[in-house]
Amino acid sequence: MVKVVSDMGFPTATLGNNNLMSRRAYEATGGYAAMSFSITEDFQILHAITRLGFGFKNVIHPYVVNFTLPMQMCSLW
C-alpha cells in the first residue's frame, strides 16, 4: 500500500531501517538535529525534504530489501 500511495504522489514512508536520501536533500533540511522531537523522525524528514522540492520514491525489489536482526533483550535487574 505504501508503494501505491507513493506512486500516486503522496509522500509516504514506512517505519524502520529502510530510508535512503541524498546528502544534498538531508543537509538542505538541516538534518535530524534541526527537527523537533518526534517518534516518527523518518516520516518527519521525508516531509521536510519534499517541502523543499526534492522528489521521493518507494522501491520494492529483491535487490533493495534490507533485513535487520531484532535487538537483544537485556535484564535491568
Image (cartoon, grey):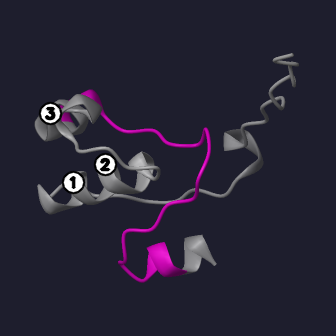
Which span is picked out in magenta?
A: 5-24
Residue 56 location in percent, x, y? 35, 58
Location of mark 1 (residue) = 48
Location of mark 3 (residue) = 30
* Element under disc 1: helix
Residue 51 relative to residue 32: left or right: left
Which residue shows up at 83% across the image and 29% down it? 69
* Element under disc 2: helix
Quarter occupied by residue 76: top right
Residue 52 relative to residue 26: left or right: left
Which residue shows up at 40% across the image and 47% down it? 41
**Distance of label 1 from label 2 (alpha carbons):** 5 Å
Callout 3 crowding tier (Cα within 10 Å): few <14, some 14–19, many ≥20: few
Check disc 3 and give the amino acid type. Gly
> Of residues 22 and 42, which is closer to you in this image?
42
Which residue shows up at 28% across the image and 34% down it? 32
Which residue shows up at 77% across the image and 47% down it? 62
Residue sticking out furthest to the front: 77
